[in-house]
Amino acid sequence: MSARERLIGPEEEPGEEKILASLRPTRLDESEYIGQHEVVRPLKIALQAAKQRGEPLDHCLFYGPPGLGKTTLAQIIRHEMGSHMVSTSGPALKRPGDLLGLLSNLKEGDVFFIDEIHRLQPEIEEYLYPAMEDYVVDFVLDKGANARMLNFRLRPFTLVGATTMAGLLSGPLRDRFGLVYRMNYYTPAELKAIVLRSARILDVPISDDGAEEIARRSRGTPRIANRLLRRVRDFAQVERNGVYDRDAAREALHLEGIDEIGLDRLDRRLLRVIMDVYQGGPVGIEALAATLSEESATLAEVVEPYLLQIGFLARTSSGRKATYHAYQHLGVSPPTKPGQVGLDL
């Protein structure tokens, strides 16, 4: 099972882009953009200062878990600066010519957005450094004695990078960003406000407690909250005669296998395997993957982060352990053998 096959997966689903675009805020106004206060205020100041000086905004790096609005902020920067945005991703830039083709078409002040920027190849990074610092790209033509340098000047632009794995970003690249912001998970109150805003846009008359129920199960992620809202909309329309309240939200999400704190069937399977098969752990990721018939990368990158965040899973040098909170949530009696570090959390 991949991230895209899970309803509560934070990655964008195929065909979801158009819907997400209609729900994205276009300004940093409080009535539109909700949450991320530690990012929004300094970014607003930087944007206003750049506009007053008539200069492009400093290069920006947004990092944090998927689904928290990094692409949305890039779009907002483009809108606030009155420019255009060219988007690509680290894996898509395979050759220096790919990069030059995009950079050479940028107009002054444009936003150049690179998603998964940590996956840029080192050769591409080398060409990006002078482009970010001096708005110039140097290409070597021919080889040996006939080699010569081609100096290609670019129009001033703003590079916006997004990554879920900031630790994999090289130091030289990271140091060239003037503005670096961490995106944090949203609170239930913020997610409730996002659900209510999206419901107005989608013309879904959801009740206040219905929005609250969706927010509680959204794993701190607006993308998931908006996806769950659409599932609740469909269920209430067909099964509840258009009544979009808490009971409708509970029934709809129970049908999808999502419990009251946002765990889905795969989350619960992983925890139960650790508890039942491996006596609470520790157990290695490869053994877990084999038992669950899942890819180890899926477990490590898609399933585990939320379980770690809420304290249901402990990752130790000897393997994964289920914590006391996980046993309590699933209604399972924890083992009593000594040395269970995970149970002490």
Image: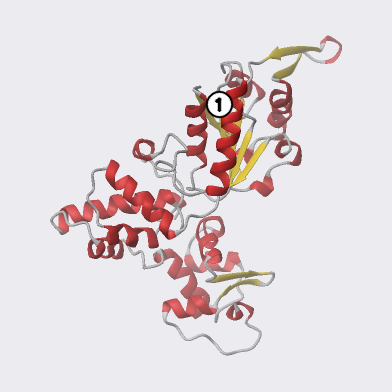
Is 47 drawn above or below residue 194 in the view shown?
Answer: above
Q: Based on the displayed image, in which of its 4 quarters is residue 203 positioned?
A: top left
Query: Residue reaching furthest left?
Result: 241
Please indicate, yes or no, whether residue 115 appears anywhere in the rendered image: no
Q: Residues within 10 Å of mark 1 (few under 14, many from 20)?
A: many
Left or right for 137, reference 213: right
Q: Position of residue 151 (x, y in %)?
A: 74, 13
Residue hosting label 1: 111
Q: Residue at x 60, y 34 (%)?
A: 46
Is 87 drawn above or below residue 265 in the view shown?
Answer: above
Please indicate, yes or no, whether residue 178 appears anywhere in the rendered image: yes
Q: Residue at x 60, y 41 (%)?
A: 42
Is 41 drawn above or below residue 54 in the view shown?
Answer: below
Closest to the observer, 181 or 87? 181
Q: Helix, strand, or loop for circle 1?
A: strand
Q: Position of residue 168 (x, y in %)?
A: 68, 46
Closest to the observer, 292 or 154? 154
Quarter of the image where the N terminus is located: bottom left
Query: Residue reaching furthest top?
Result: 146
Q: Based on the displayed image, in which of its 4 quarters is residue 145 positioned?
A: top right
Quarter of the image where the C terminus is located: bottom right
Is 345 drawn above or below residue 233 in the view shown?
Answer: below
Q: Amino acid at mark 1?
A: Val
Q: Position of residue 9 (x, y in %)?
A: 44, 53
Q: Position of residue 193 (x, y in %)?
A: 37, 52
